[in-house]
């Protein structure tokens, strides 16, 4: 199990490296820089700024400098927020984003699996139908449409929840977390349902029934285990979806997380900021994929021996 | 495992189906029997027609402000059926015009991504060996990066125009069709007709283009429909964040962004483009499901 | 202990009453295209100590008879008729009632041990749960008993192997595990659905011998379903020949092999190549393919492929007539 995990981590390094490299070179090659937008700066001032940010050095040298900084968790200075380094900005915003993301993932997994199992056990019943509708909505309607709609409903019309804002109260957290979780609730419930139905049809579940050990044990011990495998495998992509979705959620609900910094950075061509957030988020997704792989290895005895 | 010995029944039924129907046409016929999917396709066609031909019927342009009718309410029989925004611009026209961008980027983008991906994947899978290894490792590595970020990065590189947006989306989204096409190519390259083609003197390229690719079409069609969905959503997503199409051009995404900011004053700015987008996405979903049921051999 | 109920066996002798009695069992499946009748009015008895074989081609409905008895018919299937076990009706009984006898006094061995064992559970857990569910044993006791059982089915190094997963066993050993699992609670009735079909030929004989010995020790009643006449010859006392969901012939094993009466049975026997055959002639086959089971059959199900059919055969379904010596046949042209 341990070697399996190590191997996975090592396998992920090229991806992380590729991410860093691609981000870096795109940022450097992209037209326009943070200094070319606003006021006209004199040649001398421009030259000084370039020097200060090492923008006059050859590319490979800048890259090396950046890698060295990364190793020390230093993402460089933000070019727009002159008083802050990217690391400081990230430290500010990351806990908020992580909190929203964590709750969204947790909710999505729990609700999704529950709906999926309920649907599989009582096919075409009322629960199954409701779950199906929720899934349909979660898959087809984008978060940036649902979000504002719910804001209108719960915030403006009913007044139950604040329309936006982040004041640490759990009331303010409900909507963003729920809306962020919705697409994954949809995917996970559909996946669980299908996989549970498949599992209930297998020969080994039939054998379990033939042993007279009781319907409960057949469902929860025999059928469920195998059914969970595709769902666990999906948690990796689910993390990517949550991470991507959080960028929009933070925008809609005014949440001070790093997703917002990413959007601002992209708009302002604040290279280090964009790169920092990209690498961070990319790292989270890669980590999630490793974790789900290891989890799969725990359930499926055939996996570890690959 | 089927509990009924299906072999006997299937044999009887297969004899009853018409002989000589090409698999693509048979699948298409199956698709047409699915009323939900067919209906959705029709609605999609209508939306597309509205967006591309509709604006021609308006006597004014998207940016033309009708100062006498600022923030006019919805009045289907007036000159502005869905009213105007607070600049006096006709809302319906803006939504239709935005639809042009969203749909165009969506379909053409998906087509381009499929085209690139299929060639890449089919070649990789067919040739196999070291080339396949290298090409697929590249795809693997790229897959590890959430594509949204990649799209934004590339968009920064190619510039904030609609064309630039198009390029960045395509450059990132060809990955999935490539993986699928490669899978098909790998299973096809060992089939006898490939050997026969080679024996008949076809070059490897000809084999790829004339045999491998057409035979992968089934699976590719199914996943392409989902790709159109992804492209439209990605473009809307980016435009919503302000990283996609830039003013004065607009797409449903950017219109929804403007609408979301105005929910406290004018709901129509959100509901109109939102409604169109959601309707399109629902239809695309049903069509994609229908295509999968009709074309994917595994489902049967 | 109650005195064993007695009755007359097909040969007229006074013997213990049958432990399993099937009367006019019909199993219908609802499919997209209509209703398929997989089992059409099958009746038979089995007694303790007796091995009954049900033989037929793929699609003859033989496995569905076992599924119906065990309450494992698929959701789109409907069973009618009667199945009594130890005197009590069990056909269409509730799963709760069936769970009391399934796995303990009535158990089943399935065809493909690779897919029939749970790949995500260790063998010890799959074995132990039978004992904890039916005999209230603690987990430790159950595992110890399971190890003993594995040793009886000749799995070497059982104490160590039992904690492995199914995919770490070979095919033959997996089937031994299935057998062990089915016999743990000393069942009075054992169903076996193609027990050796998925195994290598070399392993088949071993498994059959093992099974023979074990069920003899238990004095269990056994119903084996197979398409392999070799298995029938090796294991069974009596045989039932099935075609199109109906019983074509029933006889003691020697009677069937030496003098089959029904045209279908004759065809089967003739089609089986034998070691003492004359090499000069071609392999004989029964012309045609097994019928699709859709719709009501008019007449004998075998009529389309029967060389001896007459007008009456395609119109009137022959009833199963019972004759002397425990023989029965369903054919207009033949007396049992």
Image (cartoon, coloured by chain):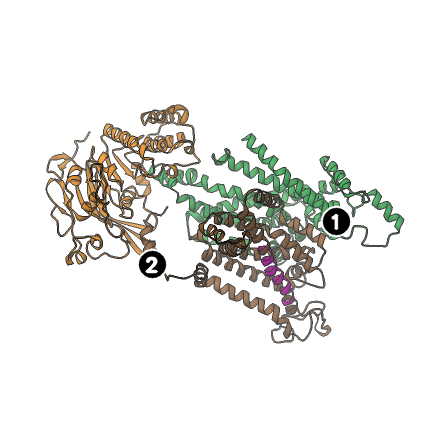
Chain colours: A green, B brown, C orange
Is residue B100 rendered magenta in the image? yes
Q: Secondary structure at mark 1?
A: helix
In percent of width and height, residue B291 lies at 48, 58
**Residue A115 appears in the figure:** no
Nearer to me, A176 or B124: B124
In percent of width and height, residue A304 lies at 51, 33
- The residue shown at (72%, 71%) is B65
Q: Which residue is mark 1?
A: A29
Rendered view: A244 above or below C298: above
Label 2 Cα neighbours within 10 Å, binned few <14 / some 14-19 / many ≥20: few
Query: What is the chain letter for disc 1?
Result: A
Q: Measure the C-alpha gap from mark 2 to mark 1.
A: 63 Å
- Rendering quarter of residue A99: top right
Q: Secondary structure at mark 2?
A: helix
Q: Which mark is residue B15?
A: 2
From which residue to which does the magenta span run? B96-114
Rendered view: C155 above or below B55: above
């Amino acid at each position: 199990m341990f070697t399996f995990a190590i191997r996975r981590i090592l396998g992920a390094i090229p991806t992380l490296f590729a991410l860093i490299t691609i981000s870096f070179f795109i940022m450097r090659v992209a037209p326009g820089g943070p200094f070319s937008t606003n006021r006209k700066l004199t040649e001398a001032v421009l030259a000084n700024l370039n020097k200060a940010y090492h923008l006059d050095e050859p590319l490979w040298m800048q890259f090396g400098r950046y890698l060295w900084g990364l190793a020390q968790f230093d993402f460089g200075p933000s070019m727009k927020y002159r008083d802050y380094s990217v690391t400081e900005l990230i430290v500010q915003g990351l806990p908020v984003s992580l909190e929203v993301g964590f709750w969204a993932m947790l909710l999505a997994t729990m609700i999704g699996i529950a709906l999926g199992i309920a649907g599989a056990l009582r096919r075409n019943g009322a629960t199954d139908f409701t779950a199906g509708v929720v899934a349909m909505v979660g898959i087809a309607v984008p978060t940036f449409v649902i979000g504002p709609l719910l804001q209108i409903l719960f915030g403006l019309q009913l007044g139950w929840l604040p329309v936006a804002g982040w004041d640490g109260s759990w009331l303010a957290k409900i909507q963003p977390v729920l809306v962020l979780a919705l697409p994954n609730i949809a995917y996970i419930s559909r996946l669980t349902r299908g996989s549970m139905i498949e599992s209930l049809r297998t020969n080994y579940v039939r054998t379990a029934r033939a042993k007279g050990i009781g319907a409960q044990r057949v469902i929860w011990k025999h059928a469920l285990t195998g059914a969970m495998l595709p769902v666990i495998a999906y948690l990796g992509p689910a993390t990517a979806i949550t991470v991507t979705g959080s960028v929009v959620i933070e925008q809609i609900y005014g949440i001070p997380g790093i997703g917002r910094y990413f959007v601002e950075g992209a708009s302002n061509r604040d290279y280090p900021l964009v790169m920092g957030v990209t690498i961070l988020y990319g790292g989270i997704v890669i980590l999630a994929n490793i974790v789900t792989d290891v989890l799969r290895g725990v359930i499926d005895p055939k996996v570890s021996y690959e | 495992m089927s509990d009924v010995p299906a072999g006997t029944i299937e044999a009887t039924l297969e004899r009853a189906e018409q002989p000589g129907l090409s698999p693509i046409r048979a699948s298409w016929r199956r698709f047409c029997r699915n009323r939900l999917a067919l209906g959705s396709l029709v609605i999609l066609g209508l939306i597309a027609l509205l967006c591309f031909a509709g604006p021609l019927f308006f006597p004014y342009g998207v940016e033309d402000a009708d100062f006498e009718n600022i923030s006019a309410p919805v009045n289907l029989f007036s000159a502005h059926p869905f009213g105007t925004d607070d600049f006096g611009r006709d809302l319906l026209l803006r939504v239709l015009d935005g639809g042009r961008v969203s749909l165009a980027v969506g379909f053409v983008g998906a087509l381009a991504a499929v085209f690139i991906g299929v060639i890449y994947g089919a070649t990789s899978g067919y040739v196999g060996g070291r080339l396949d290894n290298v090409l697929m490792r590249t795809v693997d590595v790229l897959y590890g990066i959430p594509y949204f970020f990649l799209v934004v990065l590339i968009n920064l590189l190619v510039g904030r125009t609609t064309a630039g947006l198009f390029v960045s989306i395509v450059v990132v989204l060809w990955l999935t069709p490539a993986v699928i096409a490669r899978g098909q190519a790998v299973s096809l390259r060992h089939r006898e007709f490939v050997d026969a083609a080679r024996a008949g003197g076809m070059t490897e390229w000809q084999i790829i283009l004339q045999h491998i690719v057409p035979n992968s079409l089934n699976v590719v069609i199914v996943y392409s429909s989902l790709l159109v969905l992804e492209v439209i959503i990605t473009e809307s997503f980016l435009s919503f964040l302000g990283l996609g199409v830039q003013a004065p051009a607009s797409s449903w995404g950017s219109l929804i962004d403007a609408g979301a900011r105005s929910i406290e004053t004018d709901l129509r700015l959100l509901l109109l483009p939102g409604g169109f987008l959601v309707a399109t996405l629902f239809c695309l979903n049903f069509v994609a499901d229908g295509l999968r049921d009709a074309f994917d051999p595994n489902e049967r | 202990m109650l005195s064993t109920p007695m009755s007359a066996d097909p040969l007229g002798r006074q013997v213990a009453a049958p432990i399993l009695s099937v009367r006019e069992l019909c199993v219908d499946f609802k499919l997209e295209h209509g209703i398929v009748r997989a089992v059409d009015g099958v009746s038979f008895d089995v007694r303790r100590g007796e091995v009954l074989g049900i033989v037929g081609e793929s699609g003859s409905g033989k496995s569905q008879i076992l599924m119906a008895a065990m309450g494992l018919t698929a959701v789109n299937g409907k069973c009618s008729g009667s199945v009594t076990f130890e005197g009590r009706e069990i056909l269409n009984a509730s799963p709760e009632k069936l769970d009391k006898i399934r796995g303990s006094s009535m158990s089943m061995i399935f065809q493909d041990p690779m897919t029939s064992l749970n790949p995500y559970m260790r063998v010890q857990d799959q074995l132990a749960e039978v004992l904890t569910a039916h005999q209230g044993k603690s987990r430790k006791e159950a595992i110890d008993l399971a190890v003993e059982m594995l040793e009886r089915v000749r799995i070497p190094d059982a104490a160590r192997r039992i904690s492995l997963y199914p995919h770490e066993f070979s095919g033959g050993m997996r089937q031994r595990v299935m057998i062990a699992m089915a016999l743990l609670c000393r069942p009075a009735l054992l169903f076996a659905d193609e027990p050796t079909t998925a195994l290598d030929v070399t392993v088949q004989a071993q498994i059959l011998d093992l099974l023979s010995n074990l069920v003899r020790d238990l004095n269990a009643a056994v119903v084996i379903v197979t398409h392999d006449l070799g298995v029938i010859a090796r294991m069974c006392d009596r045989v039932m020949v099935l075609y199109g969901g109906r019983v074509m012939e029933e006889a003691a094993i020697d009677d069937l092999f030496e003098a089959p009466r029904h045209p279908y049975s004759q065809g089967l026997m003739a089609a089986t190549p034998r070691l003492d055959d004359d090499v000069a002639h071609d392999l004989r086959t029964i012309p045609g393919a097994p019928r699709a089971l859709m719709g009501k059959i008019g007449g004998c199900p075998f009529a389309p492929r029967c060389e001896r059919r007459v007008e009456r055969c395609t119109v009137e379904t022959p009833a199963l007539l019972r004759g002397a010596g425990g023989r029965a046949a369903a054919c207009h042209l033949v007396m049992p």
